Image (tube, rainbow, N blue to C red):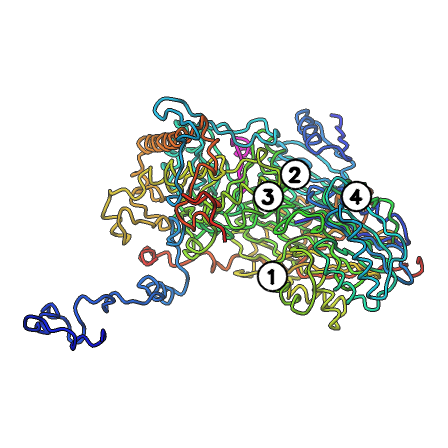
Amino acid sequence: MCGIAGRILTAPGRVGADLVDLMDAQEHRGADSTGFAIYGIPRDEGFVLRGMGFDKARLSPDMEDFRLILREHGSDLLEEPTFVTSDARHYSFRAVISEPNDLARWIRDADAITDRLEVQSCGRSLEIIKDTGSSAEVADKHGVRDMIGTHGLGHARLATESSVLPNASHPFWARPFPDTAIVHNGQITNYYTWRDRLHRLGYRFLTQNDSELIAVWVSHEMSEGLTLEQALKKSIKDIDGVFTYMIAREDGIGFAKDRYAMKPLVVVWQDGAFAAATEEQAVRRIYPGESEVINYDGPSITEIWGVGNRSMAA
Amino acid sequence: MADDLNDTYQYPFEMADEADIKFRDGAIPGRPAGVPSSYEEGGSTRWTPDAIAEVHALAQLGRYQVRGYNTFNKRMPTFDDLTFVPATMTRLPLEGYREGCDTTTVLGAGRGLVEKPLELKIPIYIASMSFGALSAPAKAALGYGASKAGTMTCTGEGGMLEEEREASQTLLYQMSPARYRIDLDHLRRADALELVVGQGAKPGTGGLLLGMKVSERISRMRTLPVGVDQRSTIRHPDFLGADDLAVKLEELRIATNYQVPIFVKMGATRPRYDVAIAAKAGADVVVVDGAEGGTGASPELLLNHTGIPTMSAIRAARESLDECGMTGKVSLVAAGGIRSGVDAAKCLALGADAVMIGNGAMIALGCNSPRYLDDYRKLGTAPGACHHCHTGLCPVGIATQDPELEKRMHVAAGAERIARYLAAMTMEITALAKACGKSSVHNLEVEDLRAMSFEASAFTGVKMAGIDRPFEW
Amino acid sequence: MSEIVIDVGKRPIREINEEIQAACKTGSPIRVVNTLSRHNLGIGLPPGVRIHFEGSVGYYCGGLNTGATVSIERNCGWAVAEGMSAGHVTVGGYAGMSCGAAMTGGLIHVKGDSGPRCGVAMKAGNIVVEGKIGYQSGFMAHQGKIIALGGAGHSCADALWAGEVWVAGEIDSLGVDVNVVEPTAEEVAEVDAILEPLGLVDSSRNWRKMISGQRLWYFQSRDAGAWLMI
């Protein structure tokens, strides 16, 4: 039960500010928490991480443990991590690390301390920022408006069957696959079946949020050899319930919608740039004038929107 | 040896005849008389006579069965598993026969958003039962009775009945998913609106009104062909989820010029989440209808096997509102299986701000009363056991659209019985509240209750009698 | 009479509706500008009013209309003119989901396509869509006509009551319990009478009319004897 948004620019620009606007217009759809997935200019080596610790009093020991695990995997911090703290108990961090020997193994070990600290995104360019509160609140706290990038996702959450916690917010990173994030509007009715199955296959879930499942589900299918398009199409059969979700990767944004066409998605392409949102009024924040609007209203549809000039821009 | 009785004891008299030992009752050879699990009764715990009858019915009809009334599931806990612990030494009781106890109940004022929150004189109102499920005289009687008692009725699905609008000083206008006979004029003539997203008797499923009750008048009001079975939608046509509901609620507020409160009614399934969502989407009042809630017609499987009990739903709903900071902003109404003021008082203590009664009100009107016995017999039932609301052949004229049968519903007499029933229920609530030392019925709280069964304690978190702590796993 | 112009922008929707209602009382035509696809514009409009929305609007525009003439220049969001009892609503572009949901009278004219569930649960009135009607259009339509000059999406005319869905173009698939019938000349004339004031009559159309299969009308036998078995 949420509002979602996507944005693609023709060249690196103020994608953060745009996503904040898109989500601000949809605040009534869910003010429990807000999150953004922003694809900045990709690094040639190393990964940028975003994460959250649950007790700011433990920040130093958390980071020590975190760094220890990194080193065990042949990696280390490339820059001093930065932190955002507030009155809330949790804190957020951003770190840049050199390549671990095996990313999946590292994150599995790093997840051993998820009761204290969570890595919420990892990629050459992906950064996920999420927190409780409205779009403006989260944007102010984390400086989202100043983030530069090529594309990204936004999400406003009205919690359904899981708790209102800063880490249960969207977007979700499809751990352990770098640079993959999803936002989802709706709810999954065979969540526990899939979660259990994927869990048995070794995937780790950090929340009880059904949307996290989609991220891992799609990435798993792709690791089994499906293309993104095939995975999106398959999800319509395999995942039950109500959903319109967008999955972003380095080179684009994919989208799928359930078989009963319950949740809308409105898209505008203009001058090579793209804005998508649950409600048309959100897109109007970016394109106040009338433009050609595409309503993805039908059942069982998928689409992939590429980020055209990305490599050139980078 | 103990297992070799013959060797150890000799009677001081002659051994009895086998025939005497077997009662000399002419029992069937090979089957001792009076032995339990005789052939007629059977002994299977799985294939009870009820279970066998159900399979026979499914096999003959080729469909599930439909009926009215409420759950027959024997495992439902009852309010009788809870008892009050009135003031004694630690607390001082109020004089039950003399001192006052406030029963005024305000619904929908919490957000400070609407001009005219509801102010009821008692914490009880008449549940949403449609004109269609009930006859017009029954609806009118409920309206007048409620007006006399200072409370309200709810239109239920199917639009506003003029007789009820006239009778009810305060009328809650229901917008069901199917939106029968909804128009702006009626919207603005209502004292409050209710959006239904489910009901306790059949959560997850839309309303049902079988063809025998789709009379000419019902057909006009609901825009249905006469005599067809009306099976309503469960999803609203114009919002699909709580996120869109927020936008829909704004529309209704504009349509009613921010005058009246908006209720959201739901069946109790996952109230811990559902109630929070409705509150956050902007409802003024959330109505939680437990699995014991009644209905005019429902697939029997849904009546018996869906939803959670009212008592547990209230606790979950209240905690949900507490957790999302909506207690005080959003009112909570509970319903489902409330029979008396005692049950109602328990609901208030568990956390409800008001309760809604359906079956109880119908019974006060005369449902299941011992009159017109032949008509009960024709339905294959008897007073006290009738659950045939769905047939439209209600012997006492309440759950019918038959012009002859509905004449049996005496509006003036029914109204007075409703008023007396509501007054009596309210007296029961205040008697308990005063015994617990409360000058307002709304100050009843969970601490005033003790559970007399593990189940009731586990379902509600109410402390177990005697050991004074909730049953824990 | 001079036109009254109301600017929407980012102002509170309640305030805008109050201005619209006040403007309705003057009898002047109303033009609402800078609509930015905002929701809940023009709710519960009185009869006789003429109101134009420049640009696109959001959800429930013209909801519960009781007789106003509403025109929307471009697109509208969900459930345009939901619950309308009378009036004439024109959508210049695309109408979102549940166009005319539960309407009880009046006419909706969509010049573009309409989204899924066009005319869902409508009780009377007519909807004319020049383009294609979306998925599950006509779902549980009680009465009234949904007329699509373009095609129809999947599950067309799903579980109709006594409503009718008329489609001149391609139909992706039919919903449950639908009968497709050949309309009579009189029935076509009735539809043309609706299209005529809109200037949309075209005698070359190959109409398909969808009505209820009536299989889902009766849960069981209506014979009273059968009730006693329940």
Report the amino acid beneath label 1.
Tyr
Q: Kindly state the secondary structure of the residue where label 1 is placed.
A: helix
Cα separation, mark 2 vs mark 4, equals 46 Å
The residue at which mark 3 appears reads as: B276
Q: Position of residue B322 (x, y in %)?
A: 58, 39
- Relative to B93, is A12 above or below? below
* Chain identity of mark 3: B
Please tell me which residue is depicted at 60% across the width and 64% down the height of the picture: A193
User: Where, by quadrant of the figure, is residue A103 drawn?
Assistant: bottom right
- Relative to A236, is C49 above or below? above
Whether labels 3 and 1 share one chain: no
Q: Which of the two discs, 4 and 1, sits closer to the camera? A: 4
Report the amino acid beneath label 4.
Thr
Q: Which of the two discs, 3 and 4, sits closer to the camera? A: 4
Q: Position of residue A151 (x, y in %)?
A: 84, 54
Cα separation, mark 4 vs mark 1, equals 34 Å
Whether labels 2 and 4 share one chain: no
User: Tags 4 and 1 in contact by the CB under 8 Å rule?
Assistant: no
* Chain identity of mark 1: A
Cα separation, mark 3 vs mark 2, equals 30 Å
Between B453 and A235, the residue placed more toward the observer is B453
Q: Residues within 10 Å of mark 1 (few under 14, many from 20)?
A: few
Cα separation, mark 3 vs mark 4, equals 28 Å
Between B302 and A32, the residue placed more toward the observer is A32
The residue at which mark 1 appears reads as: A192
Residue C201 shown left or right of residue B141 in the figure: right
Disc number for residue C62 = 2
* Magenta stretch holds residue B194: yes
Report the amino acid beneath label 2.
Gly
Residue A65 shown left or right of residue B377 in the figure: right
The residue stretch that appears in magenta: B181-195
Q: Kindly state the secondary structure of the residue where label 4 is placed.
A: strand
